[in-house]
Image (cartoon, grey):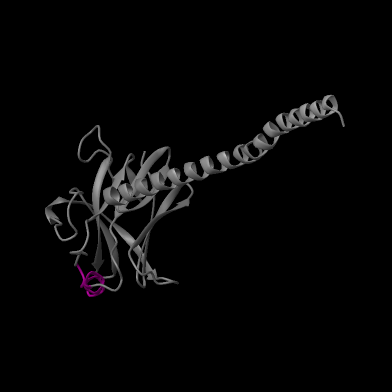
């Protein structure tokens, strides 16, 4: 090979190296980044959303405790209630109530009802706006053992501790249907059951189940 041929071969080799180098350098970056970046972003977004949801849930529980909610005739109802365990002095005191006695508990806030509608329990009306004409109805709720069963007392003082009921603020009392629960609960549980044209309030605690049907009052 003469000098001219050697120079031509060297030039061709250099051209091939310069042409291939960018391709080799770009392929890993081009193949990895577009796939990995969105996955990392999605994971970060998911984690942030989960943390935000957990914060909202903690705030809700701090503000309200446990919640039972329903919409009735286009109006919102909400009951907030504390964690009251069956294995507690509160539950044992509840089970030992005598005729005429009203429930009380030292380890939680009173059960609170907020309603945007007046409620009728078989003709017994729990009125909306008891605190103010332009504010929803607000009551604390208290089971009472009667001579022949149970009833539920609606008390006009809503934001109080479970041991602070003032009987002079009792506003309405409705009968409760009592039965033995099919599955005993480990803590107080309150929920609304949708039953046309109204709903049923269900309270369960340990072996006890209480039901009260109601509808929006006209």
Determine whether 98 is above or below 37 in the image: below
**Viewed as shown, does residue 102 lie left or right of 13?**
left
**Viewed as shown, does residue 114 lie left or right of 8?**
left
On the rendered image, what quadrant is the C terminus found in?
top left
Q: Residue 12 or 67: which is nearer the viewer?
A: 12
Looking at the rendering, the stretch of residues picked out in magenta corresponds to 89-100
Residue 5 seen from this side: yes
**Viewed as shown, does residue 67 lie left or right of 131?**
right
Single out the residue that lies furthest toward the front: 2
Determine whether 182 is above or below 143 in the image: below
On the rendered image, what quadrant is the N terminus found in?
top right
97 falls in the magenta region: yes
Q: Position of residue 166 (x, y in %)?
A: 12, 55
Q: Residue 184 or 16: which is nearer the viewer?
A: 16
| Residue at 39% in and 44% down | 52
Q: Residue 66 or 160: which is nearer the viewer?
A: 66
Q: Position of residue 30 (x, y in %)?
A: 65, 36
Q: Position of residue 198 (x, y in %)?
A: 44, 48
């Amino acid at each position: 090979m003469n000098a001219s041929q050697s120079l031509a071969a060297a030039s061709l080799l250099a051209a091939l190296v310069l042409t291939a180098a960018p391709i080799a350098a770009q392929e890993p970056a081009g193949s990895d980044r577009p796939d990995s970046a969105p996955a990392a972003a999605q994971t970060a977004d998911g984690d942030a959303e989960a943390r935000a949801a957990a914060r909202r849930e903690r705030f809700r529980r701090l503000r309200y405790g446990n919640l039972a909610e329903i919409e009735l005739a286009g109006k919102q109802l909400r009951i907030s209630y504390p964690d009251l365990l069956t294995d507690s002095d509160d539950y044992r005191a509840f089970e030992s109530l005598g005729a005429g006695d009203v429930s009380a508990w030292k380890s939680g806030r009173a059960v609170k009802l907020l309603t945007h509608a007046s409620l009728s329990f078989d003709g017994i009306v729990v009125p909306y706006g008891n605190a103010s004409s332009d504010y929803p109805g607000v009551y604390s709720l208290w089971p009472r053992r009667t001579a022949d069963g149970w009833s539920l007392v609606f008390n006009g003082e809503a934001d109080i501790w479970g041991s602070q009921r003032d009987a002079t603020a009792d506003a309405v009392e409705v009968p409760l249907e009592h039965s033995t629960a099919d599955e005993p609960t480990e803590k107080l549980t309150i929920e609304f059951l949708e039953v046309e044209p109204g709903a049923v309030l269900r309270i369960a605690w340990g072996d006890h189940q209480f039901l009260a049907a109601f509808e929006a009052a006209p």
